[in-house]
Amino acid sequence: MENDTGYIMSLANEGKYDEARKAVEALDISAGRKATLNMQIWQMQRKAESGGYDPGRIPKFPVISMILGFVLLIAGFVSEGSSQSFLCVTGLIMAGAVPAYYCIKEKRLTDSVTHRHEKEAQVYAVEDADINFAKPLPPSHIIVTGISAVVLFIIGLMIPNLFKGTAGVLASGIFILTGFILMYLCCKKNRNHNAAVSFMLLGVSAFFILVYRLALLTMTDGDTFCRLVFLLPSSVILLFFPVFFRLVKRFQCTAAAEAECIDILSISGGYVRGSHRPRYHAVWKYSYNGTVYIHKDMASYKSPVFGEKVTLRIAPADPHNTFRGKAPAYSAVCIAAGLWIALQALKPFIEMLPY
């Protein structure tokens, strides 16, 4: 076994990647071990083709930071006192500053290398397949849309400090909801369908919070009623975020396609630098309506199996919008925010409990 592994690695070092993969398939070893060897070969190939540039060193999830930032901003929107300022400032940093930093750093590192999307297309799409691998930076109109969404969100948060009463709350809500809509459209245009669904659910949750604040200004002695009718549904959406996410994806992805795992991409570390727990992307190949698709799936802590064949649920309007029954990793943060809002909604009843 050791001799076989050494021989395979020597082939990869010589640039004979296809021969190395065929040698891996010929080995009498477990599927998991084959996946590990193929992952090593792919990392060697990517590093060689990019002139030493290792994209695994750079976090590729600024969208995650945006979503978590918006969750904190929603929490800050319904909080009071010093905690509101802390949540809003932290949310703005995560929603705007962190993604901007990684985008700028990514561009600096990729300016001197061949476009990674083209390299991956050469590796996988010999039959001119449709490939969804993200480019180092999205097109300019998508970046402008995303920045506009963050700006509108900031304006919406600042308005209550400048204008009081119903007009201020209404204007604030309009700006914030428009920001969510633009972020949803930004993700849809960038073919990041999972993030688009997440922003849609967050936007609905923010809408209930807006109605709650408007109701407080128009109703007298109705605080408990407003909390139960408007604030509690907002918390339910976040508390059951994985359930609603799966329902929306199941509604969108009504067609089926037989897919094969043709590669496994590894990301060393987690969303935070210094983490050594790897995450994996399965690369699926499937056909729909005569077109071959190469699709990189959501990140997972569990390594897929090379050569595994599954039935993918896909959206007929965009076959890169896929569903395998999984919810995003940031669901836990949404649930935590939902729990906090639920406590605010049930605060009158909690205060009535005997201590």
Image: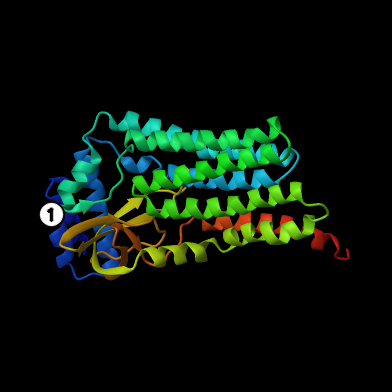
Q: Quadrant of the N terminus?
A: bottom left
Q: Is residue 277 visible?
A: no
User: Percent from the top left, x then y, of residue 277?
Assistant: 44, 53
Say whether residue 144 is left or right of residue 308. right
Question: At numbered mark 1, what does the secondary structure look like: helix, strand or loop?
Answer: helix
Q: Which residue is mark 1?
A: 18
Q: Residue at x 73, y 57 (%)?
A: 226
Name which quarter of the figure residue 29 lies in. Answer: bottom left
User: Percent from the top left, x then y, of residue 81?
Assistant: 76, 39
Number of numbered discs visible in the structure rendering: 1
Crowd tier of the residue under label 1, counting other residues whose Cα lies within 10 Å: few below 14, some 14–19, many 20 or above: few
Q: Is residue 323 visible?
A: yes
Depth order, front residue of 47/185: 185
Say whether residue 308 is left or right of residue 165. left
User: Percent from the top left, x then y, of residue 247?
Assistant: 46, 67
Q: Quadrant of the C terminus?
A: bottom right
Depth order, front residue of 300/153: 153
Depth order, front residue of 118/143: 143
Amino acid tagged 1: Asp
User: Percent from the top left, x then y, of residue 121?
Assistant: 18, 47
Say whether residue 335 is left or right of residue 277. right
Name which quarter of the figure residue 170 lies in. Answer: top right
